Amino acid sequence: MRDISPASPREAALIDATEFARLLSVSKPTIWRMRDSGKLPLATALTAQCIRWHLRTGDPSTGVLDWIENGCEPVATSNNKKESEIE
């Protein structure tokens, strides 16, 4: 049975590209390239210049740790939209 207890405050956090790059041991430009090609979980655009990712959501298409635990599979589909396209 799946644990449905609330996530710890750290797991509910939003992370930036620098922290995401550290988790994957890649550069920040690599994070942006991977995001643009649809290989990363969907990000949240707080503003046009402030992009963040949820650390854990329970869904590999939106949670960074969930995505990593799922084998880092590309999550882009024809239904996914970039943050700038979401109204």
Image: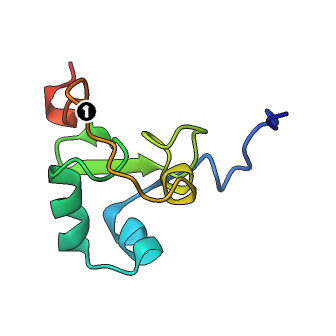
Going 40% across and 66% down the picture, which residue do you hit? 20
Q: Which residue is mark 1?
A: 77
Going 49% across and 43% down the picture, which residue do you hit? 60
Could you say where residue 2 lies in the image, as x and y percent from the top left? 79, 35
Q: Compared with residue 19, is residue 37 higher up or lower down, i.e. above or below?
A: above
Name the image quarter holding residue 19. bottom left
Mark 1 element type: loop
Could you say where residue 15 lies in the image, as x and y percent from the top left? 45, 57
Going 23% across and 40% down the picture, which residue do you hit? 47
Q: Quadrant of the N terminus?
A: top right
Name the image quarter holding residue 17. bottom left
Q: Quadrant of the C terminus?
A: top left
Q: Amino acid at mark 1?
A: Thr
Colour convention: rainbow
Name the image quarter holding residue 33. bottom left
Q: Nearer the viewer, residue 45 or 81?
A: 81
Going 14% across and 27% down the picture, which residue do you hit? 85
Left/right placement of residue 36 relative to residue 2 reads: left
